[in-house]
Image (tube, rainbow, N blue to C red):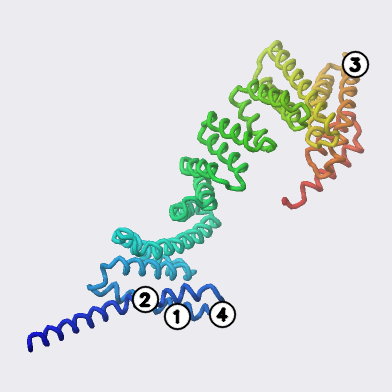
Amino acid sequence: MKIKLLMAGLLGLVSATTFAQKGELNTAKSEYNNYEGLRGSKATLAVAAKSLETAKTSIDKAAANEKTAALPQTFALKGAIYAALAVQDTVAATSLPLFNTADESLKKAKELDTKGENKDLINNAYLNMAQYQLTKGVAEYSAGKYDLAYHSFDYYRTVLPEDTNAIYYTGLAAANSKNYPAAITNYNKLLTTKYSKNAGVYMDLSSLYLATKDTTNALKTVSDGIVKYPANTDLRKREIEISLQTGKEKEVAQKIQTALAADPKNKTLYYYAGLTYSQTAESIIKEQGKAKDAAAKNALQQQKVENYTKAADMYKKALEIDPNYFEANLNLGYVILNPAIDAYNAANKLPANKQKEYDAAINKANAQFDLAKPYLLKAVELNPKSIDALTNLRTYYLGKKDTVNAEATKKKIDALAAQPQQ
């Protein structure tokens, strides 16, 4: 009988000791739950903070006790509590050690929690970890520390791999730190989501490919973007630019003509067709500067004029559909103006004893200048704050030797240029 009583006493002692050992763990859990329930209201923030501090005290004791130190729940709670403390602490010097402790604890919790009993606690703790890294990354990015920001945002992204903001911030920071492979990976991932600003992502991604001299993927990216956003002007322009850089202007022109065959009343497509020919002409100007003999220069000049003429035809078709199409008026005025400038400059290079030829050349230039005038004026009327439109109009006045209007237009340009950029 005495033996039985002694055994019963020992069992009671073991139970009491075990309860005492788990008491700190239970307190940590209870106080952390209190914190979670109270932190959402300003009126209870002070009480919530007190609960969190109590939870920290208890979890530190539980983590130091050999009976509870290795429990998955201990690591999970410690990670959750320290993550919450890190988010609350706005001083980097003191918050980072809290974050690091939380990170180590949560890694261990995931390793030990094979039954998933603390899964929700761990997951919720990682949300705080992500918030901490997001806040940290924003501060680093604002300070121009793009590489540090990339690593912070990337942690945020690993916690929330499908969060579009997480993917975008990570890609943006990577791009600014010139970590192009990481930026390209994240932007490509973003394009598989329903991110609301994916039209801009296609543009950014094409720029990243161009930065790595990968014109093939740059062109493919903008072409894919145009399929999804056919009305996006920036993507269309970028496709034309890259096509010209890679000698594929014929291909892009054909694509636009095919699109026009299916949609002949689309003013924007006519504008893009005009833009293709315009930019082809502009690229020829660069070649003219490299040409060494007169025959080559004349041949290039003819090609340039032909492309400007084709561009003018396309812009005119766009204006037949919409006479108030600003961009078409602006560009049409310019492509008509350019041959007038060439004729004007050629006339002024003639020797003094060529007065008859000079007069004929000036008359030809004036006639060409006058053809551009209606479109130049219309562009300014449609957008009086466009420096491009005013600059083209001033060029017209200079060509016509109308110094009064040229000077008045210059004052408008200078006033606009002096205004703060929006």
Dot 1 and dot 4 residues touching (CB under 8 Å): no
Q: Residue at x 40, y 65 (%)?
A: 121
Residue linked to disc 4: 43
Q: Earlier in the sequence, mark 3 or mark 1?
A: 1
Foreground tag (3 vs 1): 1
Name which quarter of the figure residue 253 lies in.
Answer: top right
Amino acid identity at mark 4: Ala
Residue linked to disc 3: 360
Q: Earlier in the sequence, mark 3 or mark 4?
A: 4
Amino acid identity at mark 1: Lys
Q: Earlier in the sequence, mark 2 or mark 3?
A: 2
Give me the disc on residue 28.
2
Q: Who is closer to the viewer here, 411 or 254?
A: 254
Residue linked to disc 1: 50
**Quadrant occupied by the N terminus:** bottom left
Amino acid identity at mark 2: Ala
